Amino acid sequence: MYTTNNTYVIAEMACSHEGKVQLAKDIIDGAGEAGADAIQLQIWAVENMMAPTRKEFEMLTNIELSKEQWRQLVEYSRLKYPEMDILAFAYEHKSIPFIEELNIDGYKLNSADLSNPLMLEAVAKTGKNINLSVGASTLMEIQQSVDRVQRISNSEITLMYGYQAFPTRHEDVHLSYMQKLRSMFELPVGYQDHSDADTQSAFWLPAAAVGVGCEVLEKHITHDRSFKGIDHESALNPDEFGQFI
């Protein structure tokens, strides 16, 4: 998936689509026209993630896209931006068979799922590239998850570092940790930027990450940050994403 000479840039849609297909298309357009290497879609079924008694259940239900809507969006991206990969950020293992039907190019797993054998094994069995988020994981958890994946498949693994706060203060980010990860695990490393999108650190911090050898950058993108919707704090507008690239 990744080139050897260029940083691979992932446009993370997250939940910025607000449950609306047209907004999702606008975000795909923003990523495609900016020249992102991939658009990343968070695909899940809320009924498989949490009990209805959780306070987030209603909110997530309201923004959940149907399988048919996801098919429509993947087809839209493939037809309009054939050079842009499509990655799936999966949150629960029961959705993996459906995601496979979409013929996406790779997966991302949350740091919390590094200790979830159901998720690791389901994704590893696809044989596709896996980005493992490690910002909230111990070194032992990282090692165990890598070992589990490698016992099952030859999936290419990239370790994605990012401080788990929205937005992240630049003084909380320790980019040198990526060098430690590369040295310890001998795997490609990437950086997930969650800087305040209204500040210049949203640009210079990822650039600094490239300077210390990160091969993959993940950056949030939204349709309009001033809308102040879900996942807006760290998300660039489409025109800003072009500047970011």
Image (spheres, helix red, strand yellow):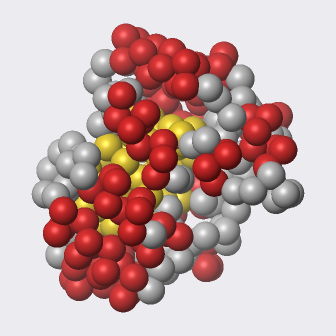
Which of 95/19 is in front?
95
Q: Is residue 192 above or below residue 69?
A: below
Q: Quadrant of the N terminus?
A: top left
Q: Residue at left 73%, top 52%?
A: 233
145 left or right of 68? left
Q: Residue at x 63, y 54 (%)?
A: 49
Q: Is residue 22 visible?
A: yes
Measured as percent of width and height from the top left, residue 102 is found at 38, 27
Point 61% across, 49% down: residue: 48
x and y percentages locating residue 123 in the rendered image: 33, 52
* Image quadrant in which you'd find residue 20: top right
- Residue furthest top in the image: 79
Residue 75 relative to residue 130: left or right: right
Q: Quadrant of the C terminus?
A: top left
Q: Evaluate whether residue 6 shows in this view.
A: no
Residue at left offset 32%, top offset 43%: 106
Residue 134 falls in which quadrant of the image?
bottom left
Residue 166 vs 235, above or below: the answer is: below
